[in-house]
Image (cartoon, rainbow, N blue to C red):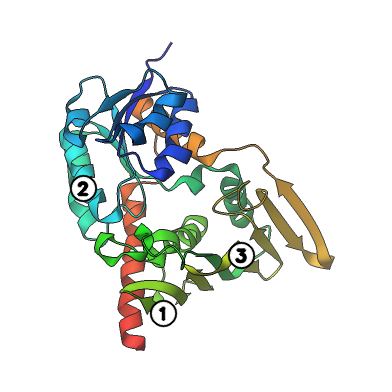
Amino acid sequence: MEKPVRWGVLGASKFARQHMAPAIHAADGAVLAGLATSDPAKAAPFVAFQPDLQVFGDYEALLAASDIDAVYIPLPNHLHIEWAHKALEAGKHVLCEKPIALQADEIDALIALRDKTGLLAAEAYMIVHHPQWQRAKHLLQDGAIGELMHVEGVFTYNNAADVGNIRNRPNVGGGGIPDIGVYTYGATRFMTDQEPQAITHADLTWENDVDVVARVSAQFDGFTAHWVNSMRMHPLQDMTFHGDEGILRLTAPFNPNVFDGAKIEIHQTGNAVRVERFPSDNHYKLQVESFCQSVRTGAPYAWTLEQARGTQLMIDRVFEAAKKDI
C-alpha cells in the first residue's frame, strides 16, 4: 500500500473548513494531519470531523513538523506568495488558493524555488480536475461545435451587504477579478490553450479601491471573448463556447452541484440539444487526489504554476487596459 500524503492547513478559514479540509480528509491517498491556528474555537469544527488532527499554535510550527508532507494555503490573497515560499523552503509540497499572486512577475521566483527544491507547488484551480471541464475540452478540441468563434463567460454574486468581507478590502488583495475573474479568464485559457492577443475593452466599476463590476473583452487567435464578473450583481454562473456549427454551454461551471447541477449542453445543427450530466463529482476531492498522485509518482499536474502565471498576467493586462479606458 502506498504511503499517504500527510497534509497541513495554514489557517482555519471558512473555505478550508467547509470545502478543502473535508476534501483532503475524504481523498484517497491523503491524510488531514495538521491545522495551524491560534484560536481553539476555530479549530474545533475541523477536529469534529478529524479527531486525530494535530493543532499547531502558529504557521511556523506546522511548517517545522517533520510528519507534514504537503501544505494547503487558504490565507488572504496578499499572503499567498510569502507563505508558499516559506512552505517550499521548509520542504513541503504546496497547494495554494487562487490567485496565487497579485502580480504575474511575483510567480517567477516561486517557479524557480519549485524547480530548485523539486517539490510540487500549484495553484488550487480546482475546475480543471472536474470531469465536466475535461469532457468539455475534449468536445471542443474534437470539433463538436466546429470552429470556435466566441466565448461568453459570467460569474457574479452580491456581497455588498458584507462590508467586512475580505473580498471588499483592498489591503488584502480583494476585488472581484482576483476572486472570480480568475475562473472566467482561466477557463477560457484552459479550454483553448490560447493566450489573449489583446484586451480590447475593460470597463470596471470600483468601490473602496476594489473592482466590483468588470466587463472585459479580448481578442484571441480566431475568436473573441467577453466576460462579466461582479460582486454586486445577482448570482449567475455560465460559460458558453460558440462555434460555427454548435454551442457548448456549462451552466454550473465553477460551483457544480452547488450553484446548479453540473452539466454540459451541446447545441448542434437542427436545434438538437444533448445534455451530459455529472451529478456526483467533487472537484475539491479530485484536486487533492490528483495532487497526491503527482507527489507520489511525479505524474504531470493538471494546473502548473506556469498556467497560473498566464491567468495572472491576463488579470494584470485587464487592470492596465482599464486605466487606458478611463
Q: Quadrant of the N terminus?
A: top left
Taking the spot 37% from the left edge, 76% from the top edge, the residue there is 207
Density class for disc 3 (Cα within 10 Å; few <14, some 14-19, many ≥20) is many
Above/below status of 212 relative to 15: below
As rendered, which of 25 and 297 lies closer to the eye? 25
Taking the spot 22% from the left edge, 29% from the top edge, the residue there is 62
The label nearer to you, 3 versus 1, is 1
Spot occupied by residue 13 in the image (x, y as percentages of width and height)? 36, 43
Left or right side of 139 for 314: left
Density class for disc 1 (Cα within 10 Å; few <14, some 14-19, many ≥20) is some
Going by the numbered disc 1, the residue's amino acid type is Thr
Secondary structure beneath label 2: helix
Secondary structure beneath label 3: strand
Where is mark 1, residue-wise?
205
Spot occupied by residue 25 in the image (x, y as percentages of width and height)? 45, 26
Where is mark 2, residue-wise?
110
Above/below status of 216 relative to 123: below
Mark sitting on residue 6: none
Q: Residue furthest front?
A: 41
Q: Residue furthest bottom?
A: 326
Spot occupied by residue 211 in the image (x, y as percentages of width and height)? 38, 72
